[in-house]
Image (tube, grey):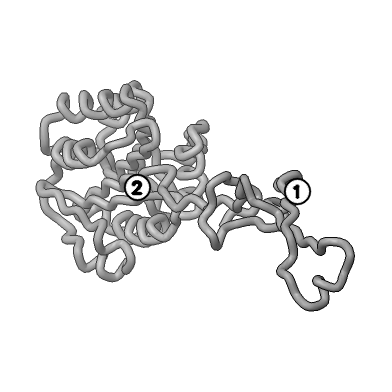
Amino acid sequence: MDRSARISRPRHRDIDWDRTIRANLKNYLTLPAPETATTAETTGAATTGTVVPERLIGYGRSSRSAKKDIVLCVDQSGSMAASVVHASVFGAVLASMRTLSTRLVVFDTAVVDLTDQLDDPVDVLFGTQLGGGTDINRALAYCQSRITRPADTVVVLISDLYEGGIRDEMLKRVAAMKASGVQFVTLLALSDEGAPAYDHEHAAALGALGAPAFACTPDLFPDVMAAAIEKRPLPIPDKEHQP
């Protein structure tokens, strides 16, 4: 219940009786008292009164609808092992926040949606399978198909960017998402180990689209997400701390 908000058609349990009575004092109605032996002996007519609540005032209900949609798109190729672990944990944390709707997608050449397992990071880890090739374009196509509120969506691609799929389509897809209002973040790694070997050409191309690619430590990740959600500049580490 949000006691700072006021609504005019509240449920019975949400009525603010103090404010309702005060707002309706002008509607005080005088009624004759029930006739009794005592009142019959009096010379004046006994009366009683009541407040007629013409307008009810109630407390607002706290909104439980998600204000932002988060999509974590995680490369599960062998070099990304540490990132997969941290992404699984952070995914579970984000999923526990009522103001966020979080989706976790992992990929190699296939795409697996682990969103329904986010309540248990262990289940998520068992749902991943490290190794294999990489098809970033296919994974992004799946993520893009699940976006319903572009202006309120943050897509986080965690990958070393070695693309085994169609490069140009991948870049066009990122450009299309950004043009629709999606906040797109590219993390070369999510670990304390720094960035792995990565595709510099693809990283530069994404940077040119307004989605700079950089390595992120677990300590920095909450700040990165907060900035992306609030549409502020990302706290990108200094270049000397990047590979």
Q: Residue at x 36, y 27 (%)?
A: 181
In the rendered view, tell whether residue 203 sits above or below residue 118: above
Disc 1 or 2, which lies upstream in sequence? 1
Q: Which residue is mark 1?
A: 25
Picture quadrant where residue 173 is located: top left
Residue 143, given in percent of the width and then of the height, sits at: 22, 41
* Of 165 and 41, the residue lying toward us: 41
Q: In this rendering, would 218 be left or right of 72?
A: right
Three-letter residue code for mark 2: Ala
Residue 44, given in percent of the width and then of the height, sits at: 87, 62
In the rendered view, tell whether residue 182 sits above or below residue 157: above
* Of 226 and 18, the residue lying toward us: 18
Q: Residue at x 50, y 43 (%)?
A: 226
Assess disc 1: are there few (<14), some (14-19) or many (≥20) residues with their C-alpha within 10 Å of its C-alpha: some
Three-letter residue code for mark 1: Leu
Residue 17, given in percent of the width and then of the height, sits at: 67, 58
Q: Which residue is mark 2?
A: 189
Q: Residue at x 87, y 69 (%)?
A: 42
